[in-house]
Amino acid sequence: MSERPRETPKPTERPVRAARAVEFPDGGCARTRAALAAGRRWWLVLAAAVVLALLSLASIVAGASRLAAEAQGLLTAGRVVSEVLNAGVLWAGLPVLSGWLVRRPAHGVLAGVVASLTALVVHYGAGQMLGVFASSIWGQNAGWFAIAALTGGPLGAVGAIARRRGPWGLLARLTVPVGAVLEPFVLGVFTVPQHLPRLERVSGVVSGLVLVAAGVAGVLAVAVERARSGRDDERSRGCS
């Protein structure tokens, strides 16, 4: 009788385990990259807060300086820059930007509060260290810290929602530009009383025009982006 051919031994589960061992590092690398990207976004949030705080402080210092008193045009320009950098819409735009950076609405709420409070702490803290503000500045501006804590979260969520492509994303993207257009009219900078010094009247009107122009440009940019994305959607539907 001829011998029966020996059956080839079935492969063990070791290759499967090896495959799993290969997949795990890849997943770990993906998670590591995601964590690093999230960390970079949070550093950008803090950097934006510090930059705004220091630029605002620098504009105040430059405006208070008498070195440019002889150059009326330069002094007016400095006053305009100071008023723009200290505009409410710019400080409200900080938590919106922070929420946009961290992307998720839940994270945006936290980022908005952190960025707003960080900017205030850096602004007043650095000003006190430089002798621009007295130690009483903290108590005098406690209301701003309360406003930042209350509004930073919702504005941060708006920034995160601005990444969406639907109608809610469109409204969120229009929040800051529309606010820039409305702020000068709400504050009445274009109807400054004539008894005020000429420097204040001119700087108020010019800074208001800057905000309106920036807001209109922002609205147009959002509209163009919306139209372009609509055309891309139509093309993709036509090709499918």
Image (cartoon, grey):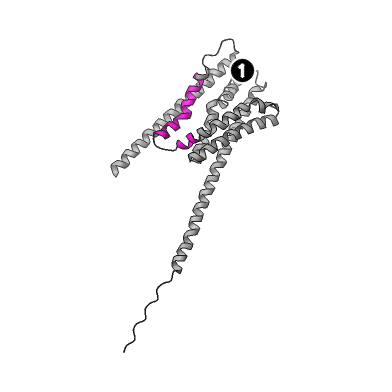
- SS for tag 1? helix
Q: State which region is magenta.
A: 157-185
Quarter that holds the N terminus? bottom left
Residue 104 appears in the picture as rendered? yes
Q: Is residue 194 magenta?
A: no
Q: Residues within 10 Å of mark 1 (few under 14, many from 20)?
A: few
- Quarter of the image for residue 90 reads top right
Q: Where is residue 86 shown, x and y percent of the image?
A: 58, 26
Residue sitting farthest toward the top: 195
| Residue 19 appears left or right of 143 | left
> Residue at 39% of width from left, 32% of height from top?
224
- Quarter of the image for residue 198 reads top right
Q: Where is residue 177 shown, x and y percent of the image?
A: 47, 28
Reply above or below: 49 against 10. Answer: above
Reply above or below: 19 against 230. Answer: below
| In-front residue for pair 80/95 | 95
Q: Where is residue 204 shown, x and y percent of the image?
A: 55, 18
Quarter that holds the C terminus? top left
| In-front residue for pair 63/153 | 153
Residue 58 appears in the picture as rendered? no
In this figure, what is the number of numbered marks? 1
- Magenta stretch, main secondary structure, is helix
| Residue at the disc numbered 1 | 72
> Residue at 49% of width from left, 59% of height from top?
24
Q: Is residue 163 magenta?
A: yes
Q: What's under tag 1, amino acid-wise? A: Gln
Reply above or below: 180 against 162. Answer: above
> Residue at 54% of width from left, 21% of height from top?
207
Q: Where is residue 159 shown, x and y percent of the image?
A: 48, 35
